[in-house]
Amino acid sequence: MSRELTRLYRALAADTDPRALPDPDQVRRRADRRARNRATLGALTAAVLVAGTAVGARLVLAAGPDVPPGPPAATPTAGASTPPASGTPSPSRSAATPSRTPAAPRTSARPPATTPTSIPDRAFFALPAANDAGTGSQFVPGPVLPALCGATPGEAQVVTRRARTLAVKLAGAAADAVPDGSYRQSVTVYRAGRADDALRELSQAVRGCPEQPLADAPGVTVTQRLLDGARYGDESVLFETRTPYRDVNGAPTGGDEVHLIRAVRIGDVVTVLWEQGWEGTSTDRSQFEADSRRATEAVRRWLG
């Protein structure tokens, strides 16, 4: 401490109250301690600042490069679409705007038909009392079509079949009179979708066999031909057979014995009405048409 400072300090002490003042060396030590405290505090503050800077740098590096903020979100206006959030796939146009779904095709309330595997008696028609010859029906095996040069139309597609024979008389005939004719009626179930093939093959067989020898009459020829007629069921085929009239010895007597055959298809079922006559009679056309309708309706009612 300089002499000048000591002198000034002493002068000041003389002017103050009589309270003792600290020694100059003590003041110097206090001043030196304050200086060291200020230095220590400065160094500590610097260390804290350096540590904070390092930590902040690590956080910034971990967060990645700065991403400039996007433009402020605009307020959606009517009709404007809001872009999807990140990571959410954008909905397709079909999802955004409902499309009109085609109407399902209308279906019948009736369940799909199944192919019958048996044929009940009710599938065959009943004669009116005026036409009933009183002989009843006989369900017996035998041919269901005339011989057509050996053709067997539709036989490969048959599922099941029943056939019967019954006699018929014309209305107004005497009760004890002999029958006026007879029927061989059959009902045949074909594989699904094949009954129409059977009718087509039948038509082809008739066309392909215009005539043939009569099996039980040597030298006698029977002819076949398709006929036009009213349509029955889903479709039908009508044809005739013609055989010359003969005497007991087999000699022709003039004219022909004519018999009608009609096949009617209803779905996968075909009923055949083959009029065979009775002791040389020919088919009565009006009676045959009426019984064709009855046979068709019987099958329809059975199939439901």
Image (cartoon, helix red, strand yellow):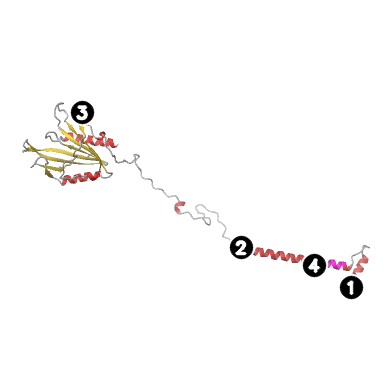
**Residue 261 inside the magenta-drawn segment:** no
- The answer to which quarter of the image holds residue 51 is bottom right
Position of the C terminus by quadrant: top left
**In front: mark 1 or mark 3?**
3
Q: Residues within 10 Å of mark 4 (few under 14, many from 20)?
A: few
Helix or strand or loop: what does disc 4 sit on?
Answer: helix
Closest to the observer, 157 or 55: 157
Left or right? Give the position of 183 relative to 56.
Answer: left
Asked if the residues shown at circle 3 and circle 2 are in contact, with their CB atoms under 8 angstroms apart, the answer is no
Q: Which residue is mark 3?
A: 129
Q: Which residue is mark 1?
A: 4
Which portion, as a residue range, is magenta?
Answer: 26-31
Asked if the residues shown at circle 1 and circle 2 are in contact, with their CB atoms under 8 angstroms apart, the answer is no
What numbered label is drawn on residue 62?
2
* Residue 103 location (% of width, % of height): 38, 46
- Residue 233 visible at all: no
Left or right? Give the position of 57 relative to 130.
Answer: right
For the residues marked 3 and 2, what is the alpha-carbon distance in whole angstroms?
108 Å
- Under mark 4, the amino acid is Arg
What numbered label is drawn on residue 61?
none
